[in-house]
Amino acid sequence: MAQTQLDAILASINNVILGKQHPIKLALTCLLARGHLLIEDLPGVGKTTLAHTIASTLGLTFQRIQFTSDMLPADIIGVSVYERDSGRFGFHPGPVFTQLILADEVNRASPRTQSALLEAMEEQQVTVEGTTHTLSSPFFVIATQNPANQIGTFPLPESQLDRFLMRIELGYPDAKAERALLLGQDRRQLLRELQAVVSVEDLQTLQEQVTDIHVSNALVDYVQRILSHTRDSGHYHSGLSPRAGLGLLRAGQAWAMLEGRDHVLPEDIQAVLPSIVSHRLQRRDEDSPEDWIDQLIRQVAIP
Amino acid sequence: MAKADTSPDHHAMNQLIIALFIGALPHFVYQPFWVGLAFMVMIGWRLLHSYRGWPLPAASRWLKILHNGTAALMIVLIFGQFGLTIGRDAGAALLTIMLAFKVVEIRSLRDFYLSCYLGFFLVITNFFYSQSMLMVALMLLVVVLLTGCLIGVNSESSAMPLKRRLKLSTQMVLQAIPVMLILFVLFPRISGPIWGLPQDASTATTSTMPEQITLGEMPSQTGTTGMSEAIQMGKISQLIQSDEIAFRVEFENDVLPPASARYWRGPVLWQTNGTVWSPLPKSERSQATPQIGVRGSAYQYTMTLEPHNKRWLFALDIPTEKPAVIPAYLTSDAELHSQKRIKNRAQYTLESHTDYQLNAGGDPNLWAALQLPEGQHPRTRQLASDWIQQSQGPEQYIDRVLSFFNQENFVYTLTPPVLQGDTVDQFLFESREGFCEHYAASFTILMRAAEIPARIVTGYQGGEVNPVDNVLTVRQRDAHAWSEVWLPERGWVRIDPTSAVSSQRVEQGMADILPADRTSPRLIAQNDALVQVWRDLRNNWNAINTAWDIWIVGYGPQIQKTFLSRLGMDNPDWRKMAVILTLLLALTGIVMLLLSYYRRAHPDPAVRLYTIFCQKLARLGLNKGEHEGPLDFAVRAQNELPQYQHQIAAITRLYSELRYRHPSDALLSELETQIKQFQPRQ
């Protein structure tokens, strides 16, 4: 049951976004693990389309927030406005009150605005003038970020990055996928025609089932080894946080579920590891090779 | 309302019942029949409950009364049978019966544990009766089964298969062996049987060398009752019926005296009333130490004497050195006596000469060697006085007597006719069928009648050498009696009149005299080749038994002392032993801790099995990276060895299920078989 639903979701998304099976699977993993996703890539590779496709496929209400440098927190959260009719202040919810938010180019906004979103992500609620408003459930943020070397950006600080469960890159499509893309239908047209594959309730059931995926002691040992390696090996400025460890385990569970298993294997952890640690770990040796995450995996023996 | 029944399932119960049944089995033989009967009835009740749903005592008040009442009746029966002193037998019977009653009562895990632990006590009681290898093997089995029961009710997944449970319990029992060995070797030994009850100690051996020998019918006036009568009635021919081991001898450098020279001296008999021969009372005998002159080389040997509850220590002829470990002395008639009665198997080293002169210069007890019963044996005395007049000197007279035995129609038989009246006269002139005691006694009378000092020496002659370990085993059936005469200048000279009648007895030993089916089963005795095989088997078995008896069962205070001083521990006393024992036990504990720490690296049996699988692939050059997950490795291996892809997939699936999903014994044993069957070749 769960497996057919998951397969249908993946097929539907892959039908719109061509040649990106792995990042899409990771994105879905992140969503199933109730984490938020950070997509970091150049403009025009399909970040927005991906977010949109996910929302449509899962039947989630969708809001896109284009971050700009002059944006204020109220533009995201909403404002209290004095209403003449009732003679009191009424809360006008901002775009954050939706199930899936695409926070586009989040690094263009000022740190103050960024943190308003990130705090909302973490707490699942916002407080405006002493009143607490619960955000919708499920609540999933896909933030996109242009590579930091572009002009006029405020890169997210490390402490904020930790709030994203995963960071992925889409990259250019390969030649075959690109050709299909160029020859195929208009993506916007496709998106408009897209039908929800599962209901919101189904999605929440799936998210609950993720926590039932069995985690053995042996696997926890492995995760602990990875954590202590990042802390003790001296390759990184600071090791992974316990939150990162929990996220790694949860993402591993979701990945195992997508793989059709009811228990987590070290391979699942290894599959999600790069997207979980790449934005959290800062290497001491800046000149280290591109595949440093593979090296990290190779350095930790499976117990 | 009674509490709910929380006893383990009937598989665990059955295993416990089997273990206890085997443990109690020897008691069916050692104890009165009703002990075994009560045990079987109670066990049967429990089995009927398991299989037929019969109610247990807890089900109703009447059944409870029946159960408890029978138990009380059993206690009364035990008192009736064994009296009020709780000795070995009563204790063992009580434990056996009460254990069976407990099994019927088991209603909780706690009861189950109690029965298991009582079962271990039951194992111990069996060693009060027998310490043979067979018993040890049987009791080891019981210990393994009982440990398996404990594992069964404690294992995390109760579905642990029986085979694995027993394997684990065997391993645990084997792991206990180092500690057992240390305790065995070093634990200070107490002399005397543990149970220490007089009636038990005296039943330890059934046949011993008699203190007196009796010819013919016992004169009625000396008849007493009980044990002492049996001893007084002692006849060596009765001893011949027994194949029990008297002692074993190991000669240094395997230098053995020839068969005809193997005379093991025991009690010396001087006094006779015509029927009964007995030793010289201590008060009448001179306490002078014997004068011994020796020629030739000596035999060095170690004796292992079975307990006989008497003081004498047997020795080859005259021992020229006293045993080092047992306080002993040589009497004036050259018997080797221990200070204490031999109640445990004793081991001592001696030196003897077979070419010796004993009291050649004169013997203060010679007067007793001429004593004749008043007014008896007239015909014998007449014969002696005739012959001594015809002879020149005692040597010629002795030859005359020996040729009389040899040439007249004397018969050597184990079943002589019963002699009545004047035993010696009757034997020499009428029946002429006799056994060593008859020949020795009548020869001695003939000597004394001719004024030649003579006495009877009892002991053993011969023995069987086991070619496997060169140990000479002397059994009760080798018991013998011969004469010694005192000749001027030569001292006491051994004369064996039996050899004049049946040289076979002395030269070949007793085994040749006995009917063939005493030494090998009748069916085998027909076929020479089979007899040879049988003999080899028996020799090997005897050699093992000898080692077992001497080193394991006989490991008492003396052997411990000898052994420890051989290990370089001078003058071992219990304090030293306690210190070393503590140190060694601590060392064992540390080693076991280290071992368990080392094993902690791979506490998961699935990983240990999977490692074997990886090693098999590594031989083909497929090395699993330490960071490589099982699935990734399987994919790689399947690409390299497509012909084994199904096996690899199955093993990997089992392993990852076991390791990362749910450990289960069924899957584990399947993984074990799969990996055993997996024999990859390039």
Image: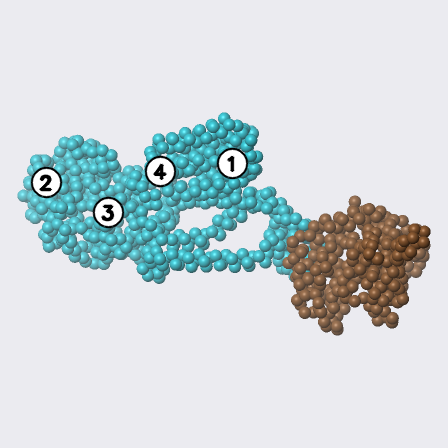
Chain colours: A brown, B cyan
Determine the image quadrant of residue B79.
top left
Q: Which residue is mark 4?
A: B86
Q: Could you tell which of marks 4 and 2 lies nearer the N-terminus?
A: 4
Which element type, helix, strand or loop, lies under badge 2? Answer: loop
Q: Which mark is residue B106?
A: 1
Query: Could you tell whether B35 is left or right of B46 in the image?
Result: left
Which element type, helix, strand or loop, lies under badge 3? Answer: loop
Using the numbered discs, state the Cα–Cα distance from disc 2 to disc 3 in whole angstroms: 28 Å
Q: Position of residue B476 (x, y in %)?
A: 28, 42
Q: Could you tell which of marks 1 and 3 lies nearer the N-terminus?
A: 1
Nearer to us of marks 4 and 3 is: 4
From this view, report whether residue B483 is shown above or below residue B592.
Answer: above
Residue sticking out furthest to the top: B62
Using the numbered discs, state the Cα–Cα distance from disc 4 to disc 3 in whole angstroms: 29 Å
Amino acid under label 3?
A: Arg
Determine the image quadrant of residue B350.
bottom left
